[in-house]
Image (cartoon, coloured by chain):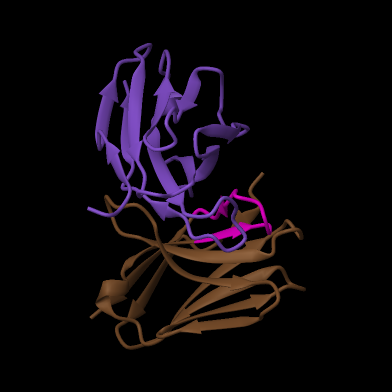
Chain colours: A purple, B brown
Amino acid sequence: GAGVSQSPRYKVAKRGQDVALRCDPISGHVSLFWYQQALGQGPEFLTYFQNEAQLDKSGLPSDRFFAERPEGSVSTLKIQRTQQEDSAVYLCASSFFSSAGGAEQFFGPGTRLTVL
Amino acid sequence: DQQVKQNSPSLSVQEGRISILNCDYTNSMFDYFLWYKKYPAEGPTFLISISSIKDKNEDGRFTVFLNKSAKHLSLHIVPSQPGDSAVYFCAASRSNDYKLSFGAGTTVTVRA
C-alpha cells in the first residue's frame, strides 16, 4: 500500500517492560512525526524528523521515550520501563515537505499501547 | 495548555441537513488551520484547510470559515451523509512550523 503503516497495531505490555513501535512512512516523504493520543483527546506532538535528523523532541514526555530514524525512512519509537500513563494510541505521520504551513501530514492507523 | 479547543464532544444530525463543527484557538501566532476526519481504528485523514489570509475555503460539501478576530473557525458539511459519521479534529499551526496542535475532537453521528 502507498500509505503510512505502523506495527504492531495493538500492544499490551506489563508495567516496566520495554516496547518498540514501528512506522513505515510514505516513500519519499522527508518529514516524519510521532504523536501520542490519549483516550478522548486529540493527538499531541512528540517528536519530528527531517530525513534521519531528529530536529525536535520537545514533546517526548520523559527520558524513557526515545525515537530514531537511522536511514531517513523507517522510524522506531521506543518506550523503556513502561508505566500505566503511557497507555495511549501512538500515531505516526509523514509529509513530503520539510516544514508545515501547508504541508499535509499523512497519518498511519496508530499503535494502541496498553500498559497493565 | 490546550491551544486548540473543540468544546462540543459530539454532534448528532439528520441525513441531508447541515453539520456545523466549531473550533477555538488561543495562540494568535497560528496562521494555518486544518480539519482531519477519523474513522475508528484508522488514522486521521486530511479533510480541508485554510490559511489566515482567507476567511473561507470550500471543497465540495465541506466549507471552512475562519474568524481571526474571534480566533474561531468552523466546518460546515452540507448535506450531511451517513459516511460523514466520524470524529473530526481541528488542528492549527504556524507558517514554517511543522507542529500541529489538535483539538480534542467532535464525534459526528449522521442519522438516517
Residue A48 part of the magenta segment: no
- As drawn, B105 above or below B53: above
Measuring 25% from the left and 38% from the top, which residue is drawn there? A9
In the rendered image, residue A65, in percent from the top left (x then y), is placed at 49, 22
Measuring 26% from the left and 25% from the top, which residue is drawn there? A12
**Number of numbered markers:** 0
Along the line of sight, the residue nearer the viewer: A58 or B19 = A58
Horizontal placement of A9 versus A50: left or right? left
Dividing the picture into quarters, in which one does residue B45 lie?
bottom left
In the rendered image, residue B94, in percent from the top left (x then y), is placed at 68, 57
- As drawn, A44 above or below A63: below
- As drawn, A1 above or below B90: above
Measuring 70% from the left and 76% from the top, which residue is drawn there? B53
Most common secondary structure along the magenta stretch: loop
Horizontal placement of B4 versus B29: left or right? left
Residue B91 part of the magenta segment: yes
| Magenta residues (range) | B90-104
